[in-house]
Image (cartoon, rainbow, N blue to C red):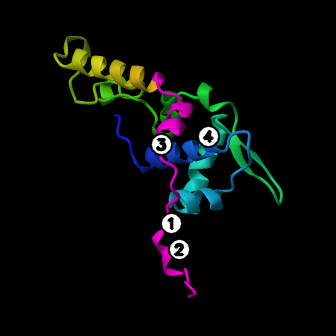
Amino acid sequence: MMHISTKGEYGVRVMIDLARYYNKKLRSLTDISQDEGLPVQYLEQLIKKLRDADLVMSARGAHGGYQLSRPPEEIRMSEVLSVLEGALAPYACLSVNGAEAACGWDKLGSCSTRSLWARLQDAIISTLESITLNELVDTAPHTPIRMPEQQQNIKIQL
């Protein structure tokens, strides 16, 4: 069933960050963590999923980091969210694994609400297919956020 978790939200933020720097420089998870105000440990889990899905590439070394595997205008949000969240289905009976009457109803063919959920799923997928990562970079403000722990450690000298 579709539910956008922190995994989806944070993963999209990582992808927007990487899109901002596409063809400019590699981004370390520390840099992304500091700019987006996200915990590095969580980003490590997300970046692995994104790399396994060939959305992100990595380079090792002193100047290593991460970058998108292809241009941001070629990456659709439906692809990103599918990798991070799984099935983009508003109700479990529409997902591949939920086809076996997730609601307990054993006659899905005669379900009175299934067509509603299917139309909603089509609208969600169509919307996410129409949005590229590049569009989000163009519309998203870029103001780095500091994590609360980091703010506590900042010393100001007058």
Residue shown at the point (48%, 49%) measured from the top left: 10
Residue 107 appears in the rendering: no
CB-based contact (under 8 Å), mark 1 and mark 2: yes
Residues in magenta, as a range: 129-158
Judged from the image, the secondary structure of the residue bearing numbered disc 4 is: helix
Apparent side of residue 157 relative to residue 22 in the rendered image (left or right): left
Please name which of the two marks, 3 or 2, marks the residue nearer to the observer.
3
Please name which of the two marks, 4 or 3, marks the residue nearer to the observer.
3
- Residue closest to the eye, 47 or 29: 29
Q: Quadrant of the C terminus?
A: bottom right
Residue under label 1, please give it.
146
Residue under label 3, please give it.
140
Whole-number angstrom distance, CA of label 1 to CA of label 2: 6 Å
Residue under label 4, please give it.
19
**Of pointers 3 and 2, the one earlier in the residue sequence:** 3
Residue 61: image location, x then y, percent: 83, 57
Residue shown at the point (25%, 11%) measured from the top left: 109
Three-letter residue code for mark 1: Arg
**Of pointers 4 and 1, the one earlier in the residue sequence:** 4
Residue ranking furthest to the right = 61
